[in-house]
Image: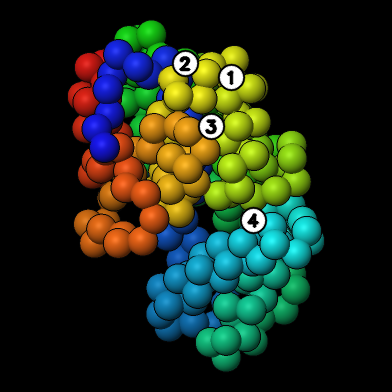
């Protein structure tokens, strides 16, 4: 599969791990929890959060992504034997409102916008989370809008969410490229009819399961290059 720039009108971006760095929660864990190494807890937290969203889709048990993250954090702390009271857990959770933006975001989105592509965020995050994310990333002036899973009360990679995003953008679904650092998000977009761009920031191995992405890039600047922006 190959990305064809002439067929793309709109670019949608995932948020967490794509535009902002979820690993930045490690500093909040160090500050508010008695831990020597926050990295394993952070990984468990993120993995469990993703698992909960997938289970929620199958059980029709939707909670906002913020609530899912709260549950996942409680599990991660317990799984690593960390005793942390409710107030400190809330302080750690609040780190999601102030995550570090990746260095390539502003310039790359600006290039795409200048080249004529409409740019949106398509995220599992609920509207309050996306508002703070966009503000923190400093890209509100470059985006047409954000599209939240909360609008359908279902999470990625449910195909109806990508189709909903196409409707919200006013773009035929095959005229959209969805960019994500999450492999299953890219596969969900491809399955629904979008082009899928996997942002492989960490040099992870290819996924042998499911549809291939249309393009794999190591940074958003490479995506802008590929779209001739």
N-terminal of the two: label 4 or label 2? 4
The residue under label 4 is 94
Question: Circle 4: is it few (<14), some (14-19), or many (20+) Cα within 10 Å?
Answer: some
Q: Which residue is mark 2?
A: 118
Residue 129 in view in this figure:
no
Q: Quadrant of the N terminus?
A: top left
Is the C-beta separation of discs 1 and 2 under 8 Å? yes
What residue does disc 1 label?
169
Q: Is residue 28 left or right of residue 200?
A: right
- Name the residue that disc number 3 marks: 121
Q: Earlier in the sequence, mark 4 or mark 3?
A: 4
* Residue 130 picture location, percent across and down: 62, 38
Q: Secondary structure at mark 3?
A: strand
- Cα gap from disc 4 to disc 2, whole angstroms: 30 Å
Rendered residue at 75%/46% (across/down):
153
Pointer 1 or 2: first along the chain: 2
Task: Tell me the CA gap for discs 3 and 2.
Answer: 10 Å
Position of 90 relative to 34 (above/below) = above
- Towards the viewer: 36 or 61: 61
Secondary structure under badge 1?
helix
């Amino acid at each position: 599969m190959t990305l064809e720039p002439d067929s793309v009108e709109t670019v949608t971006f995932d948020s967490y791990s794509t535009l902002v760095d979820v690993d930045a929660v490690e500093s909040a864990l160090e500050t508010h929890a008695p831990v020597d190494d926050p990295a394993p807890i952070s990984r468990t937290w993120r993995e469990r959060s993703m698992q909960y969203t997938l289970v929620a889709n199958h059980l029709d048990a939707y909670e906002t992504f913020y609530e899912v993250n709260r549950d996942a954090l409680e599990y991660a702390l317990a799984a690593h034997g960390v005793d942390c009271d409710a107030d400190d857990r809330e302080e750690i959770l609040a780190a999601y409102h102030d995550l570090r933006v990746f260095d390539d975001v502003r310039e790359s989105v600006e290039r795409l916008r200048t080249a004529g592509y409409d740019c949106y965020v398509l995220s599992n995050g609920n509207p309050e989370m996306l508002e703070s994310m966009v503000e923190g990333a400093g890209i509100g002036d470059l985006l047409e809008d954000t599209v939240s899973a909360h609008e359908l009360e279902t999470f990625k990679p449910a195909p109806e969410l990508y189709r909903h995003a196409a409707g919200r953008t006013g773009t035929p679904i095959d005229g959209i490229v969805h960019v994500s650092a999450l492999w299953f998000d890219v596969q969900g977009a491809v399955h629904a009819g979008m082009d899928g761009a996997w942002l492989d920031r960490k040099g992870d191995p290819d996924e042998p399961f499911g549809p291939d992405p249309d393009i794999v890039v190591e940074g958003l600047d490479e995506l802008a290059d590929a779209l001739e922006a």
